[in-house]
Amino acid sequence: MKNFVFASIQFAIIALLVACEAIPGTSPGNIAPDFKLKDIEDKTHQLSDYKGKVVMIHLWTDWCNSCRAEFPRIQEYYAELKSDDFELLAINVGQPVSTSREFQQSFGISFPMLSDPQKIMKDIYKVEAFPTNYFIGPDGKIIRRMIGWLHKKQVQVIIDQNKNKGSKTVQAAK
């Protein structure tokens, strides 16, 4: 009987440790919480659809002066960095789709402009200030959270350090 209880406890601990690996969270190393949002063209985007790429989630709002000033620079480096290994998803938090559409037109934005009028992402991704940026690895795990303005070099370094991690995992599994 003691062996059965001991084995049951061991099994429960192992199951808990395995389950923890798949629990979404907002700390580096955790699986990024998946989401499904529409863009300004009414196309649905789901984070899990971008598995295999480094994804930068840029959470912003139009009343944020920093966000407004940063958009032209983001477009500049996105045009240079976009590839099969990288995608940027700009998510307007708490405002109507028309706000994202206006920004897209004003700044000639070519990356996906998603809308979250219900502020769901603010809670899911624990947004305390704008802009907040999350980098998600090819494996779906959070690489880093950065609040505030980002420069091209910062984004480039994160992409370069993480772009092949998904393919290495796949090769190692074969």
Image: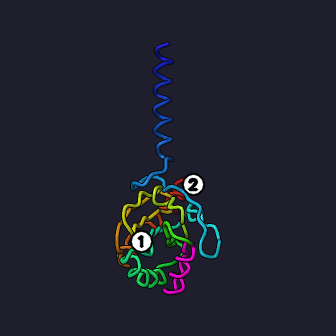
49 in the magenta segment? no
Q: Is residue 48 above or below residue 23?
A: below
Label drawn at residue 10: none
Query: Dot 2, how many residues are within 10 Å of its Cα: few (below 14), some (14-19), or many (20+)?
Result: few
- Where does residue 116 sit, x and y in percent of width and height? 54, 65
**Residue 86 shows up from this direction:** no
Q: Is residue 87 above or below residue 6?
A: below
Comparing marks 1 and 2, which lies closer to the viewer?
Answer: 1
Give, as a three-letter code, the residue at label 2: Lys
Residue shown at 53%/78% (left/top)? 111
Residue range highlighted in magenta: 97-114
- Where does residue 70 sit, x and y in percent of width and height? 39, 80
Q: CA distance from mark 1 to mark 2?
A: 24 Å
104 in the magenta segment? yes
**Residue 14 shows up from this direction:** yes
Q: Which residue is more in the foreground, 42 or 31?
A: 42
Question: Mark 2 sits on what residue?
Answer: 174
Give, as a three-letter code, the residue at label 1: Asp
Label drawn at residue 160: 1
Q: Which residue is more in the foreground, 81 or 128?
A: 128
Q: Could you say whether the residue bearing mark 1 is in a helix, strand or loop?
A: helix
Tell whether 159 sits left or right of 172: left
- Where does residue 163 sit, x and y in percent of width and height? 47, 68
Which of the marked residues, 1 or 2, is nearer the chain's N terminus? 1
